Amino acid sequence: MMDLLGIPLPVLMGQLLIGLINGAFYAVLSLGLALIFGLLNIVNFAHGALYMVGAFVAFLLLDVLGIGYWWALLLSPVIVGLFGMVIERFLLRPIADLDHLYGLLLTFGLALLLEGLFRQVYGVAGETYAIPDSLQGGYNLGFMFLPTYRAWVLAASIVVCAATWYLIEMTRLGATMRAAVENADLVRAFGVNVPLLVTVTYGFGVALAAFAGVLAAPIYSVNPLMGSNIIIVVFAIVVIGGLGSIKGAIISGFLLGLFEGLTRVFYPEASNIIIFVVMAIVLIVRPAGLFGKAA
Amino acid sequence: MSDETRSTAGTASKGWLSDVRLWAAIGFVALLIAPQFLYPVMVAKILCFALFAAAFNLLLGFAGLLSFGHAAFFGFAAYVTGYALQTLRFSAELGILAGVAVAALLGLVMGLLAIRRQGIYFAMITLALSQMVYFVALQAPFTGGEDGLQGVPRRPLFGIFDLSTNMEVYYLVLAIFCIGIFIIYRTVNSPFGQVLKSIRENEDRAISLGYDADRYKLLAFVLSAALSGLAGSTKVMVFQLASLTDVQWQMSGEVVLMAVLGGIGTMLGPILGATIIVTLQNELAQVGSLSTIVQGAVFVVCVLLFRRGIVGEIGPRLRRWRNR
């Protein structure tokens, strides 16, 4: 048996993999938060709830309509994204000119509303969502066992993060978005429909959350509380990374997931709070966040 | 939240209708006789949450700091008081004092970290730190984990005044509530309170005038935390129970809702908001998650339609009507 610092290697690698998977969800969620924050200047408290809704849409597609995983992976983000666009157009836009704390309060109310509704219908026990047949099984890598589904989650998240980064940093649409973040009025003067851009951005950010929700459905049970559990951790990660940069959101998501996994190996009692501890340390050492510009 | 939360406290105009002391006296008498008509435990619960909401409002309404982590102070103080009464066999006043002291200390640590960032970051940091307190409460050996601390004894006040009946506890709660509200009222209407308001309105300008904004904010945070702790400790005396519900993030959200619904930046608002929300919860408690759904809906409606809260919307209208 190979040992590393007294920990059997398969155990260590297993926990690191779990950490990396969690990190993937953190990264996709904080990426969406950062996108939304950039254009709307609000922290979307409903992000966790919409991640939960994404998982439930996948579950309902299968349960009611018999639509399987792969279509759900496409349809659920589209449905939740459209829902998000409705939220932005009719609830967030009327308060866009007010203090941004109102956006936080409103989305918090939405989160309560969504979570309460799903809890009322489905209870807190949660529903199971089976891993699709094509992703069953796993690989024996010699030093550890890698389940196919987990490898897929990791690959899919990395691809989505990279694609989003490419979209924002390398395309004309992304350039327009970044310009609107810098100075919305000027971009508007050039004839760009900024309000539409804002609505689409909110929809896209929320669709990312739903995508993460579908990916998470077979791993965790589909549970009304799954969103609020993860979103507070993601908030801490966002404080650590700073909401300013796309790259920062992705990197800090993966890194902190990994770090959380390591903590679970070496000091499991602290694994629940380690990210908050890191946040506190970052606030002391570098208050603006690792990737943030000084406010 | 500058324009929306302009204080209505302390802007008393002429006439007996707006005499704060008169209304305070009427309210006090009403609360004195309330347990003759209403279930004392229910009114005591409302008073605890009203104090909690007023303490929270001290921070949001008068210093402009939105904390999403006040459950940490409320709930952790409850645990400390419960432990002090149950295991350390403290008398009632020392048990409550211990809770308040720990809440203030916790407020100092959280405040020091949170005031390093502003606005939404402040809200997220307080939320994250309070979640950390939640996990500590879940895992620490003295909190009873999922069960919480149950059957906390109501030890006599100062070792002599018996607190065994609900009625006696009610009057203790009423006394604590009055003291707490008085402290908040005096703070808001003191030079310190004025500086807080100036920081809320324009922090840069307050700094340029020579005020150490961070120190004022920290002090307000600690005071708010201590008073929230007082509310939590008092709640243990009423229900003889300290549980995870009190430290959960939902509780932080509830107190925000109470203040926003009643009217942030007003003295009466949080008290009214707490009364409405606690009553609502009691009515809806039977129907699963209905209470959460209604709370979420109230939040959304509040932010969209009446941001100044009930007191904040009605107060100015009343004054205009009277001045005609």
Image (cartoon, helix red, strand yellow):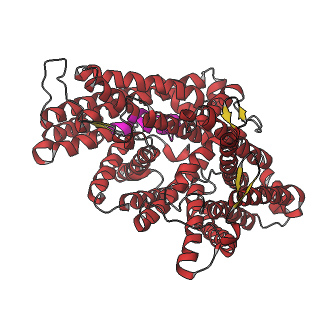
Which residue extends farthest left? B36
| Residue B58 in sight in this render | no
- Please say whether residue A286 is one of the residues in the magenta stretch: no
Q: What is the quadrant of the C terminus of chain A in the image? A: top right
Q: Residue at x 20, y 39 (%)?
A: B26
- Please say whether residue B59 is one of the residues in the magenta stretch: yes
| Residue B243 in sight in this render | yes
Q: Is residue A288 above or below residue A160?
A: above
Q: Residue at x 60, y 70 (%)?
A: A83
Which residue extends farthest bottom? A65
> Chief secondary structure of the magenta span?
helix
Q: Is residue B8 above or below residue A207?
A: above
Q: Position of residue A99 (x, y in %)?
A: 60, 48
Q: Is residue A154 above or below residue A288?
A: below
Q: What is the quadrant of the N terminus of chain A in the image? A: top right
Q: Kindly indicate the quadrant of the structure image that contains residue B242.
A: top left
Q: Position of residue A89 (x, y in %)?
A: 63, 67
Q: Position of residue A183 (x, y in %)?
A: 80, 52
- Horizontally, residue B161 falls left or right of residue B99, namely left
- Horizontally, residue B252 falls left or right of residue A54, namely left
Q: Residue at x 70, y 43 (%)?
A: A13
For the record, the magenta segment spans B50-75
